[in-house]
Image (cartoon, rainbow, N blue to C red):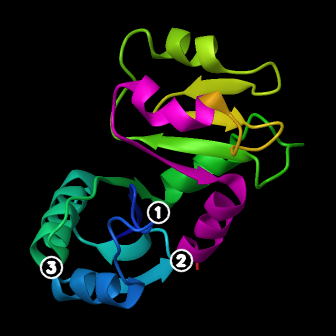
């Protein structure tokens, strides 16, 4: 059995794609996943499964469509992978609410680093690291040109969490 964190992209942002977390937990439990829990209202699902990450991703995406009538991309990491990502934070002195990590479903497309560089402000350092991309938003994301277009610049499905949330997910999935 493997402990996973499934990160749903675009859930409960604004008025679109509304999914109640109790209903999400129920959907996952009904598909046979164990120790199902959620964190925050933004689609952070923790579970234990006897399947590989790709199968978990696929089954959750289908379950969301079947249960809620909407599509949500899901990115899955094992507890160990998530822990390693957080431990490798390239901005350890940054504000945990302004340091973000994008979890990619696959490798960023060719030219992604150049596209990010073209929009990143001088106070927005970033690092590509395998299937994650870190950004430290010096003045926050609200007024950042990079933040608005970030996921599209990568050319692959990605979902972003701030360091505070990612750290809490590591703590929760490690219990």
Locate residue 126, reporting x and y percent.
68, 26
Where disc 2 sits, the SS reads: strand
**Residue designated by label 2:** 39
Secondary-structure class at tag 3: helix
Q: Nearer the viewer, mark 1 or mark 3?
A: 1
**What residue is disc 1 on?**
13
**In the image, what residue occupies the spot 57% across and 25% down?**
128
**Residue in the image at 25% along x and 80% along y:** 28
As drawn, 20 above or below 59: below
In this picture, residue 105 sits left or right of residue 131 = left
Q: Secondary structure at mark 1?
A: loop
Residue extending farthest to the right is 93
N-term mark: 1 or 3 = 1
Q: Which residues are magenta?
A: 146-174
Q: Is 109 rendered above or below residue 12?
A: above
Does 79 sit left or right of 92 as displayed? left
Q: Nearer the viewer, residue 131 or 144?
A: 144
- Quadrant in which the N terminus is drawn: bottom left
Residue 160 position within the rendered picture, expressed as x and y whole percent measured from the top left: 53, 48
Question: Quarter of the image holding residue 22?
Answer: bottom left
Q: Which residue is mark 3?
A: 67
State yes or no: discs 1 and 3 in contact (Cβ < 8 Å).
no
């Amino acid at each position: 059995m493997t402990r996973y964190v499934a990160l749903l992209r675009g859930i409960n942002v604004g008025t679109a794609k509304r999914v109640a977390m109790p209903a999400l937990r129920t959907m996952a439990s009904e598909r046979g996943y164990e120790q199902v829990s959620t964190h925050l209202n933004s689609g952070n699902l923790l579970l234990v499964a006897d399947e590989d990450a790709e199968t978990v991703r696929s089954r959750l995406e289908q379950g969301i469509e079947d249960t809620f009538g909407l599509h949500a991309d899901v990115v899955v990491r094992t507890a160990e992978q998530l822990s390693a990502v957080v431990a490798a934070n390239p901005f350890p002195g940054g504000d945990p609410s302004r340091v973000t990590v994008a979890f990619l479903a696959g490798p960023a497309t060719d030219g992604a680093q150049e596209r990010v560089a073209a929009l990143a402000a001088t106070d927005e350092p970033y690092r590509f690291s395998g299937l994650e991309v870190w950004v430290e938003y010096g003045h926050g994301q609200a007024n950042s040109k990079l933040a608005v277009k970030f996921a599209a610049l990568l050319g692959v499905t990605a979902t972003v969490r701030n360091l505070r949330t990612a750290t809490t997910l590591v703590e929760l999935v490690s219990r």
